[in-house]
Image: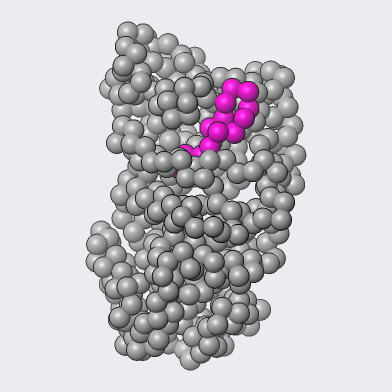
Amino acid sequence: MRVFRTDRADFGPAWLFDLLFSGTPVVTWAAAGSLPAGFQRVDRFAVLPAPAGRSFMVSLAARRGAAAALTSYNSLRAGRTRIARRVLGLGLRAGLAQPLIRDKIDIGIAADATDAQLGDDLLDEHLRLIFGGQRVVTAFGGGSGPYRKPVLQVFSTDGTPLGYIKVGWNDWTRAAVSREAAALRACAARPLRLGVPEFLGLSAWRGLDLLITGPLPRDSRRLSRSGLPLASVLREIATLAPGLAAELAASPWWLGVRSRTEAAALEPTARSALNRVIERIERRYGPVPLTFGAWHGDLVPWNLARSGSRLYAWDWEYSTQNAPLGFDAVHYYFQVAFVAGQRPLGEAAALAANRAAAALRALGLPDQAHRLVALLHLLELAVRHEEARSSTGDVDERFYPAVTDVLQQALAQPGGLAGPRTAGRAA
């Protein structure tokens, strides 16, 4: 079957529309007004610019639902984005913005499609069944790069948030939604001071794995990027799995690093470089005792919010049960420096190693273990990148191949990631 695209060859979200609205004889998509003969429009999406050159797709099926997709949880966004979304949301609700939006996509169904076919192949019909039979309005994005996956926001037509859906579409993202489901189940099984989204289930649809979670509290507000959550929060996350003390080389996490590296379909240069780093770490640090527990996997300010006095954390897709204690603290500072601050990789890694020291000490880690935990965290991210790349073929060019150079340099100098050559620049 033909796939109908917009008239621009560089239409970035094409892969998302292909994934969600193509690959079946009865559903297709095209630029607004360009559906092929024999298809009738059932939905129209506005394609809106989003940060970092991405796009955000909003269904125009219901004014209040479309407006809610722009304005719900606006307190989690930065000032300029919050204002822009507020203005556009008001325009959508009033019906004034729709004619002014340049890029629109039509979703079409075959005129002769049966109800059974639509129930099987049309995403909105599947979501309607998930959310109790009511009509829904969706908005979604998916980004680019090795970690890309669609994330859908689902609203009722009156604008009530119903939930979020993450889509596992390849080996890596299917494993990611499975990890998140397991983490949310673990959180639900015990009382936590930390709030998490409600786990609503896993659903299979047209070869895709859909993780369904409930909405956040409506009054959720963003955190500043300056402060890591209290050590008590980090300990609570760590105790989602039974604690373990073991030598690094004998730990389940280290054995997992080795097996994950072997299982990933890495290109030869990357495999060789990564294996050299792993061998050097094991020779030097294999007998070192460490403490292991669960970690969130992506504990960063943009995955955290407060509702009243309670802290909430979402995006648990990287969570695992047996990571070195302290990974969440190092990861927080690393991502703030590397992603939010756009620091070069080596500087971000050194900065994270330095800034996480107080949190690691509060968690009970001896000072001599701090640099090792930071080094192992960077190795974890390297393995994560290669697992994702083996599924998509995409590379995070800011991260790779610089990560292997940073790891090798850290192993070559006494101070590790905060050695003399990087500590000064990172301070």
Q: Quadrant location of residue 202?
A: top left
User: Is residue 311 located in the magenta-colored stretch of the structure?
Assistant: no
Front one among 425 and 160: 160
| Chief SS of the magenta region | strand
Q: Nearer the viewer, residue 319 or 277?
A: 319
* Residue 223 image offset from top left, x and y in percent: 69, 56
Q: Is residue 419 left or right of residue 204?
A: right
Q: Residue at x 37, y 34 (%)?
A: 19
Residue at position x 53%, y 83% from top? 365
Q: Is residue 206 above or below residue 257?
A: above
Q: Is residue 377 left or right of residue 392?
A: right
Residue at figure coordinates x 47%, y 22% from the top left = 133
Region in magenta? 154-167
Which quadrant, please, contains the C terminus?
Answer: bottom right
- Rendered-image quadrant of the N terminus: top left
> Where 155 falls versus 41 (above or below)?
below
Residue 36: in sight, yes or no? no
Can residue 289 be seen here? The reply is yes
Residues 166 and 346: in front is: 166
Out of 324 and 1, give the one closest to the viewer: 324
Image side of residue 275 versus residue 240, left or right: left
x and y percentages locating residue 377 in the rendered image:
46, 72
Q: Position of residue 137 (x, y in %)?
A: 54, 26
Find out whether residue 163 is within the magenta segment.
yes
